[in-house]
Amino acid sequence: MKKQEFIEGLQEALEIEKIKLDENTNLIELDEYDSLSVMAIIAFVDNNFSKKLTGIELASITTVQSLLKLIGLENFSD
Amino acid sequence: MKIIEDYPFSLSGKKILVTGASSGIGKSAAIWCNKMGADVILIARDQKRLKETYDILKVGNNTYYSLDLKTYEVIEPAVYEYVEKYGKIDGFIHAAGVEETIPMQLMSPKRYEELFSINVISGFEIARIISKKKYINPDGGSFIFISSIMGTLGQSGKIGYCSSKGALISGAKAMALELAVKKIRVNTISPAIVETELTRRMFTSLTEEAIKAISEMHPLGFGKPDDIAFAAIYLLSDAAKWVTGSNLIIDGGYCAK
């Protein structure tokens, strides 16, 4: 999966409408980011990478880039 | 809000999607919601009977889609098309459902899967899609799953049906909690026996005595589809703005015995 594809899918999964996500967006500072968002990210990553992140791992993320790194940059095709 | 001051039970200006709209409870609910001022989106498999329901409706941005809900992928394109044309959705009634009376030994995994597919999963899928910000009215909405008293009571030969209706009741509660933040209320209605095509078919496999016995378990006799439609109007309206995660029993007194 390409990073941009992932970011667009993430935007849809988190239902963020006010801004367009990019690698530098700080997720945890967004109004919409709450405990349901954490669950949504876990499910979204599992669906696309068959990789189950935990809430503890996600507690360490800040920007979209940090999430990409958590998933592993080698998992993206670009 | 002027509507709630003047007539809290009005559905004026609301857009309501109804599955199972070609017959029985779904048909009555769709017609009555429309009479109360709503635009309705009718969904069912049977195109001919769907059109018959559509032709009864009063003026409004009503439409119908002949869909097999077991093919879950067909749902979102229909919702998208409607919202693009007429605007966001306010409510949803999942009245599509099938009944099966089958001894346990003749049940199979496939039968359970088919029952759950229509009775439960298609309803939850529609709710998932309609609850997206791009489709749901930002002021909130109201989802209703038509369950059954058989969702909380048991009956021989109805493991599949009872469990599928029970799943709607519990699922609706979880959904109510998850969607409260979006101001979407989620409730179930549990009818006892209502005179519809579904129950007529069910009765063909019973004796006269058995039907009479069942009738006598209903202190007020069997119900009519509009008995359930009226409950749906209430739950969809602003009058029910504080009602969510509940199961409304409309049963002619069956459960009181």
Image (cartoon, coloured by chain):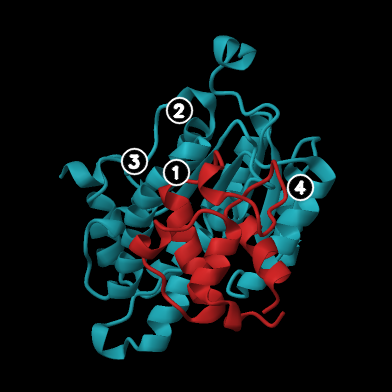
Chain colours: A red, B cyan
Q: Amino acid at mark 1?
A: Val
Q: CA distance from mark 2 to mark 1?
A: 11 Å
In terms of depth relative to the viewer, which is nearer, B13 or B84? Answer: B84
Residue B238 in the image: x percent, y percent? Answer: 53, 25
Residue placed most toward the observer, B176 or A32: A32
- List x then y, in percent, for residue B213: 23, 58
The answer to whether residue B218 is left or right of residue A36 is left
Q: The residue marked by circle 1 belongs to what chain?
A: B
Q: Residue at x 64, y 56 (%)?
A: A11
* Distance of label 4 from label 3 (alpha carbons): 28 Å
Q: Which residue is mark 4?
A: B83
Disc 1 crowd rating (10 Å Cα; few below 14, some 14-19, many 20+) is many
Marks 4 & 1 on one chain: yes
User: Which of the two discs, 4 and 2, labels the residue nearer the N terminus?
Assistant: 4
Residue at 27% x, 47% y is B218
Q: CA distance from mark 1 to mark 3?
A: 8 Å
Q: Is residue B156 left or right of residue A25?
A: left
